[in-house]
Image (tube, helix red, strand yellow):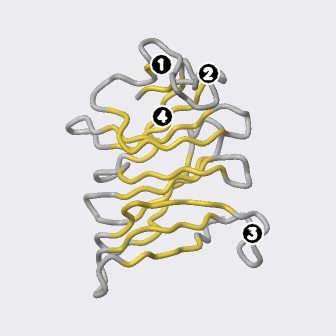
């Protein structure tokens, strides 16, 4: 997993150690990465660890603005977690991460309970098999009836009508 700061507004080049900064290089890491800036104005990156025998969703919390180094945490290691990741910042200032678990086929959600995501709670948002691909999270804090809760759009390959887009208002808080 690498990070890099764009050298200019067009992002024609990236700073780092060749280019970019290596945040995690242990095993096969960095697939399906998604980034959000946290309440502390530092990056919070969700990504998959595909190392054989691991298959986990990990989070890296940047320790400085340029994200040269980060604190890494495994947040979900159930099944084959960490596919098709989307991360947003919740109204509580902590990360919400949606991802697909290939083993169960379910859409899973992790809600970080601190800035580093060193503690979190996990939910199965949609337990149907073959759902949760290409997930995308958003939060509209002003939404009537759903203010502050994540809205999740994702691909559903399970039901009779193949390839439908499902929109799910997560009622987790």
Whether tag 3 and tag 4 are in contact, CB under 8 A, the answer is no
Residue sitting at x 61%, y 60%: 138
Identify the residue under disc 4.
73
Instruction: Please report whichever mark, 1 or 2, sits nearer to the chain's N-terminal start.
Output: 1
State the image quarter where residue 22 is shown. Answer: top left
Identify the residue under disc 1.
21
Q: Position of residue 112 (x, y in %)?
A: 59, 47
Which is more foreground, mark 3 or mark 2? 2
Instruction: Characterize the local packing of mark 4: few (<14), some (14-19) or many (20 or more) Cα atoms within 10 angstroms.
Output: some
Separation of marks 1 and 2 at Cα, in angstroms: 9 Å
Instruction: Characterize the local packing of mark 2: few (<14), some (14-19) or many (20 or more) Cα atoms within 10 angstroms.
Output: some
Instruction: Please report whichever mark, 3 or 4, sits nearer to the chain's N-terminal start.
Output: 4
In the image, residue 108 sits, relative to residue 41, either above or below, namely: below
Whether tag 3 and tag 2 are in contact, CB under 8 A, the answer is no
Instruction: Please report whichever mark, 4 or 1, sits nearer to the chain's N-terminal start.
Output: 1
Identify the residue under disc 2.
66
Between 55 and 137, the residue placed more toward the observer is 137
Whether tag 1 and tag 2 are in contact, CB under 8 A, the answer is yes
Identify the residue under disc 3.
147
Q: Label 1, secondary structure: give it.
A: strand
Residue 37 in the figure: left or right of residue 127:
right
């Amino acid at each position: 997993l690498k990070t890099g700061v764009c050298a200019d507004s067009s992002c024609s080049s990236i700073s780092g150690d060749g280019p970019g900064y290596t945040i995690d290089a242990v095993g096969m890491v960095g697939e399906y990465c998604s980034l959000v800036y946290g309440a502390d104005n530092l990056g919070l990156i969700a990504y998959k660890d595909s190392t054989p025998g691991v298959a986990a969703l990990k989070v890296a919390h940047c320790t400085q603005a340029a994200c040269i180094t980060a604190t890494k945490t495994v947040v979900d290691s159930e099944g084959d977690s960490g596919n098709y990741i989307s991360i947003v910042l919740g109204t509580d200032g902590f990360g919400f991460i949606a991802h697909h678990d290939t083993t169960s086929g379910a859409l899973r959600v992790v809600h970080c309970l601190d800035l580093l995501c060193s503690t979190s709670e996990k939910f199965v948002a949609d337990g149907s098999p073959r759902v949760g691909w290409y997930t995308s999270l958003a939060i509209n804090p002003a939404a009537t009836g759903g203010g502050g809760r994540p809205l999740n759009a994702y691909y559903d390959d399970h039901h009779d009508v193949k390839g439908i887009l499902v929109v799910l208002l997560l009622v987790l808080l």
